[in-house]
Image (cartoon, rainbow, N blue to C red):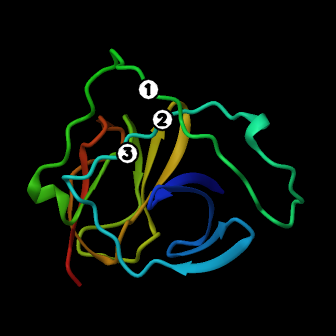
Amino acid sequence: MRRYTIEVGGKQYVIEVQEVTANRYQVFVGDQAYEVRLSSDEDLAEAQITPEMVPFRASHVPQATPSTRQAAAAPPPPSAPSASAPPPPRPTADQASGALTAPMPGKILSIEVRQGERVSRGQVVVILEAMKMKNAIKSPRDGIITQIAVQPEQGVAFGDLLLQFGEE
């Protein structure tokens, strides 16, 4: 389960999201639960979201029973400019639509699909080893594999092209 703090119209909300299947989620907003179905998604090269670690402060959370799923969040502290490395390169325009890129640096252990194969959203397509852990990389969409850009035992960097998708 993931917990997010979002701001809508100047008001902050804490939401909890639990993945039920590849395109179905259970979302909790306060004490309300919603069943959410993802009908489509796309990566936008212009959009970049950079998560920030914010320490949990128990003093800001009201007492709640486990059944209410209520939570409160303190606004994140202002962040100081950091001397961290620049963000990783974004995919090129031709990769932005129909491309599956490496979410982290690592080594390709196996490719679970073949070129020309029809895949479904959520289907495991590549196994990537990173930090001594096997990571199942899943298809972000339905489609046909038009190109496999990697091979087993190959090292990849963040953002490297793994597979290219075509329309069904």
> Measured from the top left, where is residue 128 in percent x and y?
44, 45
Q: Residues within 10 Å of mark 3 (few under 14, many from 20)?
A: some
Task: Give the residue pinned by disc 3.
Answer: 103
Q: Nearer the viewer, residue 116 or 63?
A: 63
Q: Amino acid at mark 1?
A: Ser
- Helix or strand or loop: what does disc 3 sit on? loop
In this view, the residue in front, 1 or 139, is 1
Which quadrant is the N terminus positioned in?
Answer: bottom right
Q: Secondary structure at mark 2?
A: loop
The residue located at (35%, 46%) in the rendering is 49
Q: Position of 141 compared to 25: left or right?
A: left
Residue type for callout 3: Pro
Question: N-terminal of the two: label 1 or label 2?
Answer: 2
Instruction: Residue 9: give its label.
Output: none
Do the residues under discs 3 and 2 have CB atoms within 8 angstroms? Answer: no
Determine which residue is flagged by label 2: 52
Q: Residue at x 47, y 39 (%)?
A: 129
Q: Which residue is mark 1?
A: 79
CA distance separating discs 1 and 3: 25 Å
Mark 1 touches mark 2? (CB < 8 Å): yes
Instruction: State how far apart marks 3 and 2 are (Cα).
Output: 17 Å
Q: Which sits in the foreground, 58 or 121?
A: 58
Task: Give the crowd class for mark 2: few <14, some 14-19, many >=20 residues within 10 Å.
Answer: few
User: Total of numbered circles in the picture?
Assistant: 3
Q: Left or right: where does residue 21 sit relative to residue 138?
A: right
**Which picture quadrant has residue 74?**
top right
Dot 1 or dot 3: first in sequence order is 1
136 vs 140: above or below: above
Rendered location of residue 28, percent (x, y): 67, 68
